[in-house]
Each structure stands twice: as C-alpha cells, then as structure tokens.
Image (tube, helix red, strand yellow):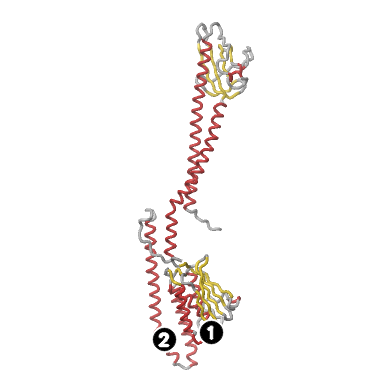
Amino acid sequence: MAERRALSLATRFAVVTAAWGAAALLATGVILTELFRRDAERVFDNRIEADLLNLVREASGRHGNAPEIAVEPLGPQFREPFSGFAWQVRRADEILAQSSSLGPPVAGVMEPLSPPGATPADFLAPGGIPSRGAKRTVVLRGDAAPLVFAVARPRSEIDDGVAYFSRLLLISLGVFGVLTFAASLVLGRVVLAPVSRLKDLVRRMREGAPEPGGSEDWPGELVPVVEELASLSAHMERHIERSRNQSSDLAHALKTPLSILRQSVERMPAEAALPLAAELERIESSLDWHLTRRRLAGPRRGRVGVAEVADEVVYAMSRLFHDRRLDLQCRVGADLRFLGDREDLQEVLGNVVENACKWASRTVRVDAALDGEGLELRVEDDGPGIPDPVADTVFRRGARLDETAPGHGHGLAIVQDTVHLYGGTVSVGISALGGALIRLRLPGAAAAGH
C-alpha cells in the first residue's frame, strides 16, 4: 500500500478555516433569513390589521340592515380575480359584501373567506390560493346582529421577498466567504512563516552554519524547538568527535604491532612468509576498511574550499607517481565550497585520483562545478577505461579489475560509502580523454560574495 503523507500545516490551517468559515456563513445565512422572514411577516400582519380597520371604518359609516360599501376601500389589487387579495363581510353564514377579486355576492355560490382567527395566520383562500389573513367580529351601530369582517393577502408577497433576500444574501456571503478564505491563506503564510525559517535554520546547520544562538527572534512556541536543535547539534558533534578519536587511537595502537609482524615476516624464508604476508595484508586492509567506516559514523559539516583540497591531492599524487611523469590537471574554481568535512573530501578525491593515476597512460584531469543538485566533481583519465559489464562492481568492497595492480580494492568502496553518507551519488562513465570518468555529486555551494 502507498504510504499516506500527513497534511502540511498550511493545508490543515486552510481546511480548518474553510470548514469553520463555511459552517459560520451557513449559520449566519439561516439566522439572517429567518430574522428577515419574521420581520416581513410582522410588516405583512400590520398591513392586514390596517386593512381590517379600514374595512370596518368604511362599513361603520353606513346605516341599515346591511353595510353598503360601494367603492373598493382597500386598493386596486383587491379587484383582480384570484389575486389572493380579498375581503369579505358576512352575517352568520350570509355574505353581505366582498371584494371584486372574489366575484359578486351571489347567494348559494359564494365561498366564505375564513381566516383562522383574529390574529393574522396562514390559510387557503377561495380558489386554493395560499394566503395570510385575519377576521374580526364587530357589532355596528343600529345593527343587532354581529358582522364578521375578513381580510386576506397572498402569502407569495412574503415568500417572494424572502426568496429575493436569500439570493442576495447567498451572493453576498459567497463573496465574503471567498475573500475570507483568501485572507486566511495569506494569514496562514504569515503565521507559518517561522516554520519556514526553522526549516532554513536546519538546512544552514546541515551546511555548517553556527548553531542558533538566541531566541529573541523566534515565537515563544518555537523557542524550545530551536534550543533543542542547538543542544542536539552540539551532542552529535561531541559524539562524532569521540568516535573519530577512538578510531585514531585504535589505529595508533595497532600500528606498532603490525609493523613488528611485517618485519618478522620479511625475515622469514619466502616459502613460509608468503601465506603469512597475504594474511597480514588482509588484516591491514580489513582494519583500514572498518576504521574508515567508523570515522564515517557522522560527517562534520563545514564549508570547505574544493580548490584547496584538490590542489593538495593532485600535488600528493604527483609525488606518489613521480616516476610515471603523469600530466595531472586541476581545473577547480576558487569559489566552490564543499558542504561537509575536509577529511571526507580528501578521502574521496584522494582515492578517486589515485585510482585514475594507476590506470592513466599520460593524463589525469580533475574539475568541479555547481549544478542544480549541488557540487559535481569529475575525475578523468586516458587509460583503458572501465568496461560496462563491471562498471557497477568497482565500488564493491575488495573489488579489483587487475589482481596484479597494487592495492586491496577498498578505495572506491570507501568513496561510495562517503558519498552516500552525504546523500550524494557516484557514477562511472567514459571520459573525453578516452579512459574512465568518475562523477561525484555532493552538497556544495558558492563562496559568499560570488
């Protein structure tokens, strides 16, 4: 199964902000819509109450057995048939007068307008129209029987207003939500900026920068983290230094006994000395291998001048292979820096250049450059090269292309271990000189000011 990656802090902040904002905007929309609906109903009910009052006032001005309402008292909308606007006056079950929207009062065919009560409420008006209305029982002067006055208005007046308000509110809250989310992204970057600084601090420490020395520029939540980083860096440096010292002590302790043994073997008859000399060489090579790996328990980080180390290695190889009169070329810029330990760079270059000198016919070339992945070191020679079938085996411990050549086959294996320790790569290719090309990729940078 594929490994699940945890969400970044910025993504978590954005997701939580978006979820909380959506919930808050949804709740706000529901609440505001409900408040608007209630206010719209209150205004609507006040109009119904005013219609009832005007209708009763109009009827009270008439005398006789029935109210005479000759003129539409409540506005022109009450004249349109089945508009939902309606009023009616009746005595018991007898309809005495009604709005033009309900038609003329014809006995036996008229449907009573019957709101639920004196308080405005929803009901179905004649014709099945959703309406809201109220009724009032009034005894007019000169009339012994009470009259029922009923008024209704279409419910769509409220619903349409609420729907229009909801659409405007949805658009407004949507725009506000988008702007808020965009602002949260910017805020997230501002809030999480110290985390990016912390990442840069770790990177600088890996490249050899001094330990963080102060917490005045860090937020309080990150101060313990910065302090722990400083403590961890110091602890690792002490541990690595102790490991290196122990390796040096062990090498020094074994040097004298091994020298005595070698001298004793050299004084023995050749027939008896040959197997002992082979075993002694195997012991020395194994010690070199294990002591080197022990020294590589953890690299010390710094900014090492590549040109200076390369010049030292080339000079040492020119003295070591003086009798072969090789043309050793070093073309390394003075501004290049290796982000690591000086001894490790010497170990890597020394082994690779020595291997090139062993196989070169005339020329060995060392150059370096920065690329997108860091520092690239190239060591070329004009020797026979490394055949493709064995190119992947030359870095194995004890691997030797020619058993008659000097050495124990550990040099390039040590190179590969060291390079991998720094997260780099080592590869074999064909040189423009016709021989082998060893390409090393290591952490690197340009000197300050370049």
Q: Position of residue 317 (x, y in %)?
A: 48, 81
Of 287 and 183, which appears nearest the observer? 183
The quarter of the picture where the N terminus appears is bottom right
Of 418 and 362, which appears nearest the observer? 362
Of 60 and 360, which appears nearest the observer? 360
Q: Disc 2 marks which amino acid? A: Ser
The dot on residue 360 is none
Q: Disc 1 marks which amino acid? A: Ala
Helix, strand or loop for disc 2: helix
Discs 2, 1 touching: Cβ within 8 Å: no
**Residue ranking furthest to the front:** 449
In this rendering, the answer to whether 364 lies above or below 375 is below
Of 21 and 326, which appears nearest the observer? 326
Q: Position of residue 320 (x, y in %)?
A: 47, 84
In this rendering, the answer to whether 200 lies above or below 396 is above
In this rendering, the answer to whether 211 lies above or below 93 is below
Q: Earlier in the sequence, mark 2 or mark 1?
A: 2
Location of mark 1 (residue): 405
Location of mark 2 (residue): 259
In this rendering, the answer to whether 181 lies above or below 226 is above
State the residue at coordinates (51%, 68%): 370
State the residue at coordinates (45%, 91%): 266
